[in-house]
Image (cartoon, rainbow, N blue to C red):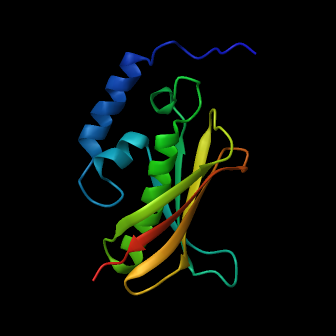
Amino acid sequence: MADDRPARVDEAVVREHMEEVIESHEQAFETFFFARFLGLNFEYLPAEAPDADKEVCRLTFEVTDMLRNPQGSLHGGVMASAMDISMGHLVNKIAGAGATIELKVQFMRPVMEGLVTCEGRFTKKGRSLSFMESRLMGPDGKLAALATATWKMPG
C-alpha cells in the first residue's frame, strides 16, 4: 500500500495553526498552549457503568501531519500526553489541580487518521491519592492505547 502523505508538513498549515494557537491560548485548564497545539476539545460526562465513579473527561482531536511520527501514525508521545491531560483535567474539575505521580501507557494499535477520542476516569478516588485510567480510541472506536496512573490529589 503506497503512502500518499507528504514528506514534509505543509508550512502554511503549520504557520496558520501556530498563529491560531498563539492567539487563542491562555495558561489555564482547557486553553493552555499545548492543549491548543494538539487541538484538544474537552467534554465532561457521567460515567456509563453503574458501578463506576460518576465523572469522565472526554477529549477529542484530529490526527494531523504535525502529530504523526515518521511511520505516519499518531505519535505515541501525543497519545500519552492526551491521556495524561484527560486525567489531569478531570482531577482539576472534581478537586482542583493535582499532579501525576506515575503513568503507564500500553499501546495496542496505531491511529493513522481521523478523530481520536480519549476518556479519563477514576478507578479509585482517594483524599490524597487517586488511581485513574484513560482509554484512547481511533475513529473506528477500537482501543488504541490505555494509560493507568496514580495522581496526587490537591490539598
**Where residue 32 sits in the image (x, y, percent)?**
30, 52
Relative height, residue 98 to residue 32 (above, below): below
Image point (36%, 31%), residue name: 17
Image point (70%, 83%), residue name: 50
Image quarter hosting the C terminus: bottom left
**Where residue 14 sits in the image (x, y, percent)?**
37, 25
Q: Is residue 137 left or right of residue 78?
A: right
Q: Is residue 34 left or right of residue 58?
A: left
Give the residue at the far right of this rendering. Answer: 1
Q: Is residue 50 left or right of residue 104?
A: right
The quadrant where residue 150 appears: bottom left
Image point (27%, 47%), residue name: 25
**Where residue 31 sits in the image (x, y, percent)?**
32, 53
Image quarter hosting the N terminus: top right
Relative height, residue 105 to residue 76 (above, below): below
Foreground residue, 103 or 32? 103
Q: Is residue 88 left or right of residue 137?
A: left
